[in-house]
Image: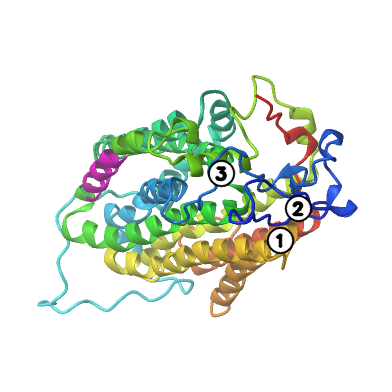
Amino acid sequence: MEDGVHCNYLVDAKKTDYPQKEEVPKSARRGIEPSMEDDSSVPEIHGESTCPLLDEQLHRGKVPGLCSVRWGLAVILHISFFVAYSQRVDLSIAIVAMVNSTGQQTSLNVSKDVCPGPSPAPPNTSQPTEIKAPVYNWTPETCGLLLSSFSYGYLITQIPGGYLTGIVGWKPVLGTGLLLSSILSLFLPSAAELGVVYLAIIQALRGLSQGVIFPAYYTLWTKWAPPQELTCLMNFSDAGTTLGTFFTLMVGGITCQTLGWPAFFYIFGGVNCVWCLLWFFLVFEDPDSHPCISTTEKEYIRSASTQKGHCHSWSLPLFSMLKCGPLWAIAVAYFCCDWLFYTLLTLLPMYLNRILHLDTRESGFLSAPPYIGNWLGHIGTGLLGDFLIAKNLLQLGAMRKFFTALGKDGPNAFVSLALLPLPPTQSDPFLSPVSGDTLSGWRRVFFLSGAINLFGVIFYLGFGRADIQDWARVDNTP
């Protein structure tokens, strides 16, 4: 927000029914169109209105806060992301129970580059026995292929998903992607029985389905979130991803061990399908189409939002986008952050099982706790960010850079500490831990992930900006 000014504009309805003119400093007029310079009652943020006044004819009652339709939508999205990420990590925890690792652990224990195996359990142990379910002799390379298949499909539909959302709207795109992914989850046990190729295809199709979810999600808040509430609403919605991860890892390990891993997919997949069907009846494309929203809230959202109607036409300013440094800063930051995040999200349960020799239940319990902290951080930073902006304690650009650095350097410190106790690396050219399952291999992948994440921080701090670019502006005239 280096070139913009954020300000709050409050109207005391008890004093007057009409907005009062205020003198706006010249510094606050940068980025305002010439046709708007005479209207000093409209504050600006990066050339866009932050909180324009409601229509003069509208009854100026109190705009609802937490008990509002927009916050109800945030709760629905919170649950929807819970569903989406429960599917994203289900195979990560289930694969621990799906693979017969006894023989592999026996051969690995002869190496000095692995942790010693657990002592044999006494005959009458009180630990619950694992339910009989199909077990496969998949190699570490096969497991890596299966876990990464989701990402192959997920990568393909990211850009088309955002483009399609701008044409047909976010509701059908997001809902269809979530529903298809949930249905495909029910076919995972059968696909595993048929073979590795079939399971990889189902995983890739689930990735294709979920690839459209986030592009649609970013579009919907341009229609539903007043800019001064955007950070809080988005972070609360996003927090469903980490809560879903926490719950699935925690409960999934227990379910796989007590009911069997096929039941885990059937139970979670069935519940997710029911939610997706309800979702279509609970959400609406914009405030104008919602049947229960109050007139006050509708006008508040409509007048404050920077987006009216669809995001773009059939043509996109691709050349301008490719030349945009701030856009590349966001893309690089996301790439680097996701590298570390999804490495831990996808492979941590397998690491705990293959290297530390923990069972399915223990792997789930130890993989889950970081995500409940992430959930709390999502919600807390959203509230704090909006507070800092509302009180003019930080500009928007500075706030985003501060939280980006804080959020990325924390995992880097954790990864660095996690690497210290490990022995020096041995000569092994493969960077992925799924080849050989050695401590040195895992050390390399943790180090590489931390280095990439740190690069993303530096790149974003150098090139990130918060002002709306010229090519991204939308004509809001009816």
Question: For the residue marked with disc 2, what is the amino acid?
Answer: Gly
Label 2: few (<14), some (14–19) or many (≥20) C-alpha neighbours in 10 Å? many
* Residue located 44% across and 58% down the image: 242
Q: Nearer the viewer, residue 251 or 299?
A: 299
Q: Which residue is mark 2?
A: 464
Q: Is residue 317 above or below residue 128?
A: above
The extreme left residue here reads 124
Residue 40 in percent (x, y) is at 80, 46
**Contact check, label 1 and label 2, Cβ < 8 Å:** yes
Span shown in magenta: 264-275
Horizontally, is 410 left or right of 456 in the view? left
Question: For the residue marked with disc 1, what is the amino acid?
Answer: Lys
Q: Quadrant of residue 426?
A: bottom right
Residue 213 in percent (x, y) is at 48, 38
For the image, the number of numbered tags is 3
Label 3: few (<14), some (14–19) or many (≥20) C-alpha neighbours in 10 Å? many
The extreme top residue here reads 314
Residue 13 in percent (x, y) is at 59, 53
Q: Is residue 310 magenta?
A: no
- Quadrant where the C terminus sits is top right
Q: Secondary structure at mark 1?
A: helix
Whole-Å distance between the Cαs marked 1 and 2? 8 Å
Residue 412 in percent (x, y) is at 62, 68
Q: Which residue is mark 3?
A: 300
Whole-Å distance between the Cαs marked 3 and 1? 29 Å
- Quadrant where the N terminus sits is bottom right
- Does residue 188 show up? no
Question: Which mark sits nearer the N-terminus, 3 or 2?
Answer: 3
* Residue located 49% across and 31% down the image: 288
Question: For the residue marked with disc 3, what is the amino acid?
Answer: Tyr
